[in-house]
Image (cartoon, rainbow, N blue to C red):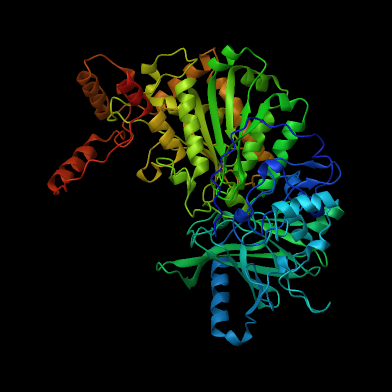
Amino acid sequence: MVVNNENRYSGGAKRFPEGGMDGVCSPLSHLSISKSDKQPASVHSPAEYCSYNVKSETVTPGLPGRSGTGYPICLCPPSLTRSFSPHKREPMVDTNDQLVRDMMMHDAERMSHPDAVVNRLVYDSHDCPGSNSQPWRTFKPEAWPFKNMKMKRDLLEQHPGEMLMGFVNKTLQPWYVPENDSDRTLVFESRFESGNLRRAIQVYNTEYDLILRPDINTRGHTQWFFFSISNTRKNVHYKINIINMQKDESLYHIGMQPIIYSEKAAAAEGRHWHRSGHNVCYYQNNIKRKNGKFYYTLTMTFEAKHDNDTIYVAHCYPYTYSELQKYIYGLEADPKRSIRVKREILCKTLAGNNCDLLTVTNFNLHPQILDSRKHIVITGRVHPGESNASWMMRGALEFLTGDSLEAKLLRDNFVFKIVPMLNPDGVINGNYRCSLAGVDLNRVWHYPSKKLHPTIFYTKEMIGRLQEDHKVLLMGDFHGHSRKCNVFMYGCERKATDNSNFKISGIPGFGVTDTMNFRIQEKIFPWLLKRNAPDAFSFAMSSFKVQKSKENTARVVCWREFGLINSFTLEASFGGPSEGANAWDHFGVKDFEGMGAKFVETILDFCNPDTTLIREVCLTLEEQYPVSKHSAALAMKMAAMNGGGTDSDDSGTDSDLDSGDEDKQQEGKKAAARKPQAKKKPRKRRASLVERQSQAK
């Protein structure tokens, strides 16, 4: 059941007491709630929780987070999301086809000898063994460890009959409890933020089949995983098989490893999240899906280094909704950074969580100067399983609010509007791609619903308003990619045959004319980013074609409806780079954060009053993307139809025809002419921003 809360918080930036980040946020410390977030009792779910720091007695803004479902969710240990990446680089492992054959033979052996298979259910996140009651409701309110009676009374008033997350984290019993010390069955858990393990089945003594939970209200999108295993034994090898993967390609094919976190290794050796696992293999299994295709198995083997350890396993470095709220609060509590950033609540999600809007600029200048600045919009985490996008966002925020001269220049000249997490509900519930409505929020930008897709609706509304009032220089949407290496971009390339009413202005600060730059304008920023981050970013892998399947994405809609030529999707691989000095090494947290910092730093080169560098880039790009004869003829024809001259908005490259091979193009046209063409109904197109302005005049 999805909880829907349509109330929109429209207040300005809020200030909260300092000190909320000082103490360690243990599970027992999350026992309070902000009065401004008080909701009717009917909209709450048992999985709601509160964030209260007992030491400083302050409430963390943005929490409690809400799952919007009836299933219990615990808080992750703070060390999981506050640990650093390894000091040394971790190379991808070598792969071979023999490993795939061995794994498939192993599966065939299991099928041919079913009597040897244990086949015992040892974990189910949705069921409670041996009882019809929910374990998180079996504890009496008198046992809750409140700080005082007033807090207890207030919380009972706001959450009647419900268990709070902090106490759930302390009292939620494991699904399987070992019978005695000789019972070496692994104990699985995923009932925490961003966890998504549905079931675990013991196959042999040290081998387990895992089934991931699909995205809420869907039957698919199983790629992200995050769970824990405990009751380990030292020097024992445990084989884990995730058997309901759905993508036919994966970076695990080329040597990517999952990441693990051992509690005892972190305490004893200071070793936090790191790549691990041997015999990591991704292959098609023999389990058939309802659509006739087959599932895929991701198998990995771990060696436990300690007895009775708890090991967390994830697809990428986790970054939860709670961690984002604590980070934003840390920015607000910092004496220097707090004067450079302001937080607003853009809207409430379906489950009632905050979708934050951060504004970063120099607020100390005259209001007229602030009003005349160009705006830059950055969004991220529309796909909840792409946690590397949040780490890039964190790097961008760290840079923009920092003390460097480059950051000061950016704040003095631009206003940054940042939506760091477009899908908080999906992040809390451990979804990979969708929201609680069961839809991909990056495919509804054309006509977002105010009720079903509030974060997209209000973000799009904000961008349109900024473009009308201030002009938006650049829009960047941060993502992660599960099948390609490197960091790269998707942009939007205009064709020579586009409607002449589709106007795109020149880029501010350029000393060259629109006529010289029009064909390659959208490629200039990515080229500069490659220059600034050569060991991570790949310009060659970047694409600027607008595919029909991507017409409802953020970059295409903002480009088409608002005229933003610099509308980009920044994709970061879950694996690592395939070129540069760090080729075939895994990306770490510092790499993702550095990429986010380079993204915003490149804006200085992009808008540098000294256009020497830009001219050099333009000449290089014009050589790399020459104008074909066919495109030139189309451009001249379009110019003649509009009264002659060389209007820069009516010239350019037809990306679908600019191949330089006119013979093949003519043959294709003749073949198409011979085929009977079905009459298509004209599709109604939404007017662009410039068209609406011209009609109003």
The vertical placement of 467 against 246, above or below, is above
Q: Residue at x 66, y 35 (%)?
A: 395
Is residue 82 in view from this perspective? yes
The vertical placement of 157 against 245, above or below, is above
The vertical placement of 282 against 672, above or below, is below
Instruction: Please indicate whether residue 690 sits to the left or right of residue 605 in the image.
Output: left
Q: Quadrant of residue 499?
A: top left
Q: Quadrant of residue 334?
A: top right
Question: If the image is split into quadrants, where does the C terminus sit?
Answer: top left
Q: Quadrant of residue 652?
A: top left
Question: If the image is split into quadrants, where does the N terminus sit?
Answer: bottom right
Which is more toward the observer, 512 or 152? 152
Residue 591 x %, y %: 66, 39
Which is more toward the observer, 581 or 132? 132
Is residue 26 in view from this perspective? no
Which is more toward the observer, 417 or 207? 417
